[in-house]
Amino acid sequence: MRSVGELVKEARLKKKLSREKLESRTKIKKEFIEALEESRWDLLPEYPVVLGFVKNIADSLDLNGKHLSALLRRDYPPRNLKVNPNPEIKEGFKWSPKNTFLAGIIFVVLIVLLYLGYSYFKFIAPPYLKVEKPQEGQLVTQGVVKVSGKTDPEAYVIVNNQPAIVDENGSFETELNINDKINEIEIKARSRSGRETVIHRKIENLLGEQN
């Protein structure tokens, strides 16, 4: 399956646009466009910024923005979340009475720590994964099995080593080609931190009996 950068480059060349002309259209630096096309993620900013780039480029090249966004979620590599466990708290205005000021500072510190704790927990937690198809023990009489379900919108899904597109709502669906030797399907959701949730579905494969 092609990467988001390959699709962007193919569409740009099809329209006979140089990176300089695309830069003029989108106001995105040509160095960022080149890095995106070549999947040089180390030369690109954080994911939310790159997502904005992709949507802008999709509009300029008449591409499907939702499809490109889904490919970006799959291709963009995990990055370590930088959390400062001891954030510096700059001294603000001194209110009167003094006790009110101190209570306000303590409240702000608690809110910051709770937010950092929640963000870090969410980052390291394995992604949610629900498989709707196939059902456990489903009979298979054809060489193609439809696999679908839901996961976190920021996760990406692999079905028996085959990537599946995850849309902006976290829904995914793909068709898996199987032979008469496959009796189990592995559905794996992986978060940006590299944490995984895996579900195995056994199937009753009747392909061999039909030969």
Image (spheres, rainbow, N blue to C red):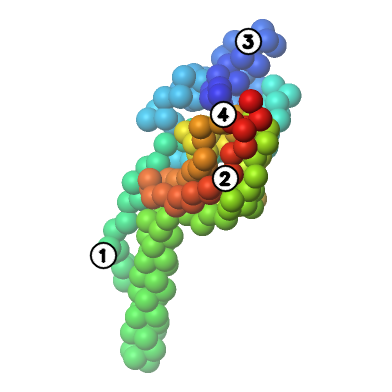
* CA distance separating discs 2 and 3: 44 Å
The residue under label 3 is 13
- The one of 136 and 173 positioned closer to us in this rendering: 136
Task: Using the image, determine if residue 95 lies above or below residue 13.
Answer: below
Badge 4 element: loop
Badge 3 element: helix
> Where is residue 40 shown, x and y percent of the image?
42, 25
How many residues crowd mark 2 within 10 Å: few (<14), some (14–19), many (20+)? Answer: some
> Where is residue 159 shown, x and y percent of the image?
52, 38
**Labels 2, 3: front one:** 2
- The one of 135 and 160 positioned closer to us in this rendering: 135
* CA distance separating discs 1 and 3: 49 Å
Q: How many labels does the image show?
A: 4
On-image quarter of the N terminus:
top right
For residue 86, the mark is 1
Mark earlier in primary sequence (2, 1):
1
> Where is residue 57 shown, x and y percent of the image?
63, 27
The residue under label 2 is 203
